[in-house]
Amino acid sequence: MTKERKTPLLDELEQGPWPSFVTEIKKEADRPMAHDLLGILERSYADRVSHWKHGGLVGVMGYGGGVIGRYSDLPEEFPAVKEFHTFRVNQPSAWFYTSDALRTLCDIWEKHGSGLTNMHGSTGDIIFLGSSSAALEPCFAELSHHGWDLGGSGSNMRTPSCCVGPARCEWACYDTLAACYDITQAFQDELHRPFFPYKYKFKFAGCPNDCVASIARSDCSIIGTWRDDIQVDQAKVGEYARSGTDIQSEVCNLCPTRCMSWDGRELAIDNSNCVRCMHCINVLAKALKPGKQRGATILVGSKAPIIGGALLSSVLVPFLEMKPPYDDLKELTAAIWELWGEHGKNRERVGEFIQRVGLGNFLDGIGLDPVPEMVMHPRTNPYIFFEDELDDDAGNA
Amino acid sequence: MTKERKTPLLDELEQGPWPSFVTEIKKEADRPMAHDLLGILERSYADRVSHWKHGGLVGVMGYGGGVIGRYSDLPEEFPAVKEFHTFRVNQPSAWFYTSDALRTLCDIWEKHGSGLTNMHGSTGDIIFLGSSSAALEPCFAELSHHGWDLGGSGSNMRTPSCCVGPARCEWACYDTLAACYDITQAFQDELHRPFFPYKYKFKFAGCPNDCVASIARSDCSIIGTWRDDIQVDQAKVGEYARSGTDIQSEVCNLCPTRCMSWDGRELAIDNSNCVRCMHCINVLAKALKPGKQRGATILVGSKAPIIGGALLSSVLVPFLEMKPPYDDLKELTAAIWELWGEHGKNRERVGEFIQRVGLGNFLDGIGLDPVPEMVMHPRTNPYIFFEDELDDDAGNA
Amino acid sequence: MTEFQRQTDIGPPHYERFLPPIVKKNYGAWDHHELLRPGVMVHVAASGDRLYTVRVGTPRLLAVTTIRQFADLADAYCDGYLRWTSRNNVEFLLTDPAKIDPLIRDVQALGYPVGGTGNQISSIVHTQGWVHCHSSASDASGVVKSVMDRLFPYFTGSKSLPSKLRVAYACCLNMCGAVHCSDIAILGVHTKAPVISHSDLPKMCEIPTLIASCPTGAIRPATVNGKPSVEIEAGQCMYCGNCYTVCPACRINNPESDGLSIWVGGKVSNARTTPQFSKLVVPFMPNNPPRWPEVVDAVERIVTIYAGNARKHERMGEWINRIGWPRFFKLTGFEFTKYHIDDFRHAGETYNRTAQLRHERGS
Amino acid sequence: MTEFQRQTDIGPPHYERFLPPIVKKNYGAWDHHELLRPGVMVHVAASGDRLYTVRVGTPRLLAVTTIRQFADLADAYCDGYLRWTSRNNVEFLLTDPAKIDPLIRDVQALGYPVGGTGNQISSIVHTQGWVHCHSSASDASGVVKSVMDRLFPYFTGSKSLPSKLRVAYACCLNMCGAVHCSDIAILGVHTKAPVISHSDLPKMCEIPTLIASCPTGAIRPATVNGKPSVEIEAGQCMYCGNCYTVCPACRINNPESDGLSIWVGGKVSNARTTPQFSKLVVPFMPNNPPRWPEVVDAVERIVTIYAGNARKHERMGEWINRIGWPRFFKLTGFEFTKYHIDDFRHAGETYNRTAQLRHERGS
Ligand code: SRM
Ligand code: SRM
Ligand code: SRM
Ligand code: SRM
Ligand code: SF4
Ligand code: SF4
Ligand code: SF4
Ligand code: SF4
Ligand code: SF4
Ligand code: SF4
Ligand code: SF4
Ligand code: SF4
């Protein structure tokens, strides 16, 4: 259809055992967009520099997000990718699909765009890579007609995502898929119409293994945990021992609080000192299980480095039952959004906001009591801003 | 001599088993200064506030430090302590005395001052508590006549101090008394004539037990250590085990790197992973000893909180042989003083200076190569100030 | 196009539509799992039902052609059900163990490898690079492909590791991924201050926002050729590119000085040790497309030395903590420079505030 | 007074003049030591020589009368040799074990206790307080005396502890001691912003230095009654008193709002764990001379609970780390408030960045 491109540099990347993104692009290269993408990318490989420019405001009617605009700086040479916007299509919870659903998405995207995707973007969306401005509206119409909606971009709630959880994992301490879906639906307006100081991400992990890296990259990380004792099947522990697991060195010695002991027959756990790290359960998957009183720890504030350095989420609520309709979580979220919405600076993530105003003041603002679980340890510097009503409150219990 | 004072509040503090500072003051209260000190102190106890004012510049001729000026805000009522300055008399290494030397000091101080002391001040000096301005010169003349000199105050080197070390401790990895004495003598000018941005303290500890708290409160902490293997007498380890020490739980399990193992007969140490923490040696004092290749780690920068929060000293030189005449340490000190002297702000301790300019730049400035021992871990944020000559240097080895 | 009924705020389709029947039946009632071989695991439900998963590596960038091929395979072997993982692998979900081998054969025939479970290296979480983003200091997909070609045996399981090892890639300091918390992270870096187009700036950018965007305060207002603009104090710039993000007239991309850095020892899970940031190992390596051999060598070196030295269950950072950073640098041969010493806001918190040190016997 | 030969820069006397002969002989050649009983230990040299030490508690503030008494005792039992320790105890150095008991009897008769070795509580390192310093938020010696009266059995050994427990006191945030790294620290705190004497300020203080002295930038230049002065933004002041240190016209002392705070879990030694700062437990307790009962009770409570719960060799902070801060607050009954959450420069570094938490079974 279009004449073959010379892409000697990219062609190198078709060698080797790992599947090649170049091959993927070439699969669609009989159509202009992928064809020109190969061209402009080969140029980047030669020039060692990106040939994309900032996006500007593009999108679909009534939404403030969901599309990332992109223009090339070589529009004459590669006209088909002069405009090369991406759609962020909100993925289903835990990225389950049927073949039919996938074919529908492929059909739509082949019709309106490059035919290239990211399965998935880092936030979790289905990424449709490369659309012209004109194609945005019709593509969206067709998507939504088939029951698909866009995810987030800009200063709004971003597309929530979750681990596979109870759908296939024995360790899920709450229903990650349901919670993710419920929160996404409950906050459609916040997802689609930017009105926050900056982005706000949710990630739902069913247990402290955190298979969606929620603690590293979500403003609100919901990590499953339990309150009662680890369930132990001593007979099965014995089986592990007999079949070669060194319980002492592989399990007990790696427990962060060393709260387990093994006498060759019984595995004893001081559950009051267990920090629910999952390690023993991970190693002895058939013998040990999380307790039965399950819920989640809510942590806030993680993000990438810019401006003040990367943050991990930190504990806000040590334990929350995660039962539909998730009112506690929604009320907490509303309180955070209200405070941050009013006092957050432009482009200030909630984690940075908390650092600026201080966690203590933040708690005051959202109406939550301080608990020692929120900090690794109490302050070491004596620079305390005592408030006027200083007396019994701050004193001895 | 003077009529008895009513000190009902202070008298309370003569009750109880611990020796009382009030009793000490009363021991000298037949003379006016201690007598009035009781009076003004009783007043503070009643008023719950200090009755001392700032010092102003007082001192002895030719010295910029060694005396802390102090005036009371009740000069009419307590005329004898209207002026109540302290001398800082430089203590001998490790606070060893003969009875004769003490008597000489007492005679001098009884003659010229209140007869009250602190044995010793927190920095290490003998503190003569309470002298009039007029008595300063004659008191100093008599002190120096008898071989005693003043310690530091103000923005200078402060009086160095050291642990008892080789004089009575089996663990001393270098001669703390000699090093402390040598450095004090070598830098007499820096001790007596303030010309630094702020104070600079040395503390010498013979081993990582750090019995002078050097890592917490000296701009330069010299902490003894060793390079080779811990000396082990297995027979004596066995004796400990037989007489009730649980080697596994009391020693092996508390080793920070868990580099020891005990099979009931032999204590094996992976010395390559031993961090010279002293714990095993402390517990098994008769069986274990530091290695034979001894020296010290040099750490810099500790201080109290104001302004930027308290600091602990951090590693500058992982290992230095501490042999007289301590040229390495002196050269290092000279380099630090030169850089900090030129670029340090007024009232900026060297630890704060390093934080402000960055440890990397500080090392450049004093001509020391960076080594990984200086940090707990390499940087986590990507905000690297690359210099122009970026290439092989920063790259792959 | 009005044939389609445009809707808004409907949200994603309900996930239950996509769950295989065996999942619906045993939802929340899984008992345990076993790793059968690299890339293949079984989850056993309390009911006794067994769900087999075959994990397949992808380049993440997928053509619709490929997705359709996957859909066909799902129809052939999995009653049409499949999922993607949080690291961009495809998982085929089977109930019949007899179909595992045929499925694997077909998948491999299409060019996609099976593996990435357990202690294998899984796919590299990565970003857009020169394929789509304007601020990338290097390409993403190309570096990832080059590294994965080399690490391939660790994905398929022909080489094994003491624990999970997560590799991530981001093409600029915005770090669109979990690069800041990965066992090994490759990060695109700019190393020269942006060049300002003073003619474009006034029309493209708001000057106060631009000034506020700089973490180190390197940007100051200035009048250039009589027009309001800004200037950058080069000595204060650490090349983060945030100004470029908010203002296209501050171009930071530079073929000569852009390149890649390598970080290690981060993690996300709470297992054993708390989540940790990645730490700098190699501050800069040149941009050397199409194969970035220096980067690939460095990553392989780290993986090999980790594989040979760490203990079972010990993640990269846990291993390094046990042996200490000095030994890590010695073992890997990378140079420790002043760039490794933090000098940003909380730098002092990383200084080594103890005399607990490993020493080596002198001669 | 010209009878005396004034000299400068002679430095301290050489320590060798003061070393007992047994120390000179065995200098650097000690083999081991044993704690014989509280306050008494023996150091055994490689030569077989045995040096006995008797450790005696003092209030640190000593009258020359007392020092002469100590000198007399040293003559009677120790050939005139004695030393002070880094925590202000006196150590009598004996070679004849038969003299230990008589010495102890004499020392105790003078009113000074023997103890403070091994895992006993040693003397409280402290500062000047109302005895000598202008910026003290409370007295030092009086609080120390009151606390030590209560902790006395832990000094003499009639009560015992799992490990060393170091208590320190400082009367203001200047922290003239090791308060910031002590197992238990008592710290005098101001809790109201300084009151400025605008009439004195111009003559007593340099305004730029004063402004620079404030860690939080709360001090701003102002003209008051036509004269240059400063004003303090009360909401920004955290009462550190640094402005008062540099400028007497910024008086911070206040009988109503000055008081004491309590901190725990610091340490200095590198044994087992690295040196650690002390952490806040009680933000404020009123100044209640002459006995400060609230403070004494709180300290005793902490010591008792530590003594009853920690394991052998476990310092205060090590124990708390093992059980976690939530349990420490629960066991001791102190309230956890927003004041316990750091909000200074590196505050964020103390937030709990993990899901590793202890939970309690619900009902
Ligand atoms: C597409 C995606 C990368 C990918 O290849 O997958 C992406 C792409 C961009 N991100 Fe991102 N981010 C993507 C996930 C992330 C993540 C990971 C996550 O969400 O789990 C992060 C780190 C976590 C976090 O939120 O901090 C991330 C942190 C950033 C930042 C830094 C934000 C910060 O507070 O530091 C920026 C800068 C900005 O917002 O201006 C940014 C900005 C951008 C922009 C919009 C660049 C820009 O300034 O215009 C990129 C558009 C690239 C393009 O042309 O396609 N992107 N970005 C990811 C979204 C796909 C999706 O919706 O599923
Ligand atoms: C006497 C002594 C306390 C004691 O009772 O023992 C003392 C007393 C004073 N110190 Fe100190 N400091 C004393 C050891 C310390 C220590 C401990 C040490 O040296 O090991 C520290 C903490 C370590 C450090 O250096 O950071 C210490 C940290 C301070 C500070 C805070 C310095 C900082 O950088 O944060 C100040 C404030 C200042 O310098 O303006 C200070 C200031 C003062 C002043 C001069 C108050 C002032 O601003 O005028 C005090 C005079 C009290 C008086 O009237 O007698 N003093 N000061 C100690 C000196 C005795 C001696 O020479 O042996
Ligand atoms: C499928 C997936 C969840 C999903 O919703 O997509 C998943 C699934 C499982 N994870 Fe995971 N994890 C998945 C991403 C993660 C991530 C996130 C990431 O890599 O970005 C993490 C955090 C990694 C980190 O710490 O940096 C993660 C940390 C774990 C851990 C903790 C490992 C550790 O010791 O630190 C376990 C426990 C184990 O493996 O023993 C675990 C265990 C598991 C188990 C065994 C859970 C179960 O019983 O089913 C699943 C099979 C694991 C396997 O691959 O062997 N999963 N797991 C993700 C597969 C990604 C992939 O394609 O490779
Ligand atoms: C005499 C003195 C040194 C001096 O030059 O004056 C000294 C002497 C000894 N110390 Fe110390 N330490 C002395 C202050 C310290 C300090 C500093 C302080 O308290 O301000 C520390 C750091 C405390 C901290 O970490 O906060 C200190 C931490 C140690 C340790 C480590 C304890 C630990 O496990 O953390 C040991 C080892 C041990 O006791 O097992 C030790 C051990 C020793 C030994 C056993 C060393 C020896 O073999 O002779 C000495 C007798 C100890 C005893 O009291 O039982 N010494 N020791 C100091 C006595 C102070 C006092 O009067 O109470
Ligand atoms: S986070 Fe926990 S519940 Fe979720 S998939 Fe991973 S191991 Fe399972
Ligand atoms: S879950 Fe973690 S903390 Fe709890 S017992 Fe198991 S290994 Fe220990
Ligand atoms: S610091 Fe070490 S050498 Fe010095 S007295 Fe203490 S234990 Fe002995
Ligand atoms: S000195 Fe410390 S680190 Fe070394 S072996 Fe002994 S306990 Fe372990
Ligand atoms: S990491 Fe940077 S360059 Fe890469 S996609 Fe994200 S914003 Fe763009
Ligand atoms: S690249 Fe970063 S540091 Fe440099 S001027 Fe721009 S915003 Fe500032
Ligand atoms: S701590 Fe403060 S009040 Fe006490 S002596 Fe030191 S400077 Fe003075
Ligand atoms: S007391 Fe401290 S915080 Fe308050 S004004 Fe003075 S210097 Fe500033």
Image (tube, coloured by chain):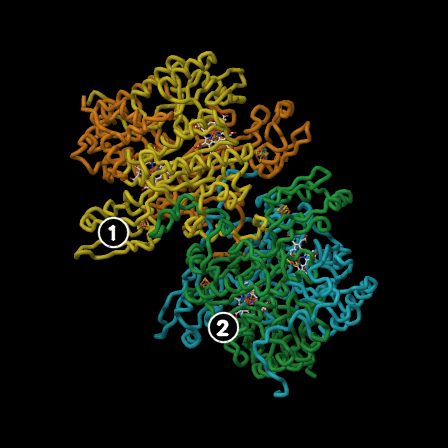
Chain colours: A orange, B green, C yellow, D cyan
Q: Which mark is residue C207?
A: 1
Q: Amino acid at mark 2?
A: Pro
Q: Position of residue C86 (x, y in %)?
A: 41, 29
Q: Position of residue D66 (x, y in %)?
A: 72, 72
- Camera-side residue of D86 and D339: D86
Q: Amino acid at mark 1?
A: Ile
Asked if labels 2 and 1 touch by Cβ distance under 8 angstroms, the answer is no
Quarter that holds the C terminus of chain D: top right
- Camera-side residue of A178 and B217: B217
Q: CA distance from mark 1 to mark 2?
A: 47 Å
Q: Secondary structure at mark 2?
A: loop
Q: Is residue B88 left or right of residue C305?
A: right
Q: Nearer the viewer, mark 1 or mark 2?
A: 2
Q: Is residue B383 left or right of residue D1?
A: left
Are both tags, 1 and 2, on one chain? no
Which residue in the protein does label 2 denote? Answer: B194
Q: Is residue C207 visible?
A: yes
- Camera-side residue of A239 and B323: B323
Instruction: Check disc 2: other Cα within 10 Å, few if <14, some if 14-19, many if 20+.
Output: many
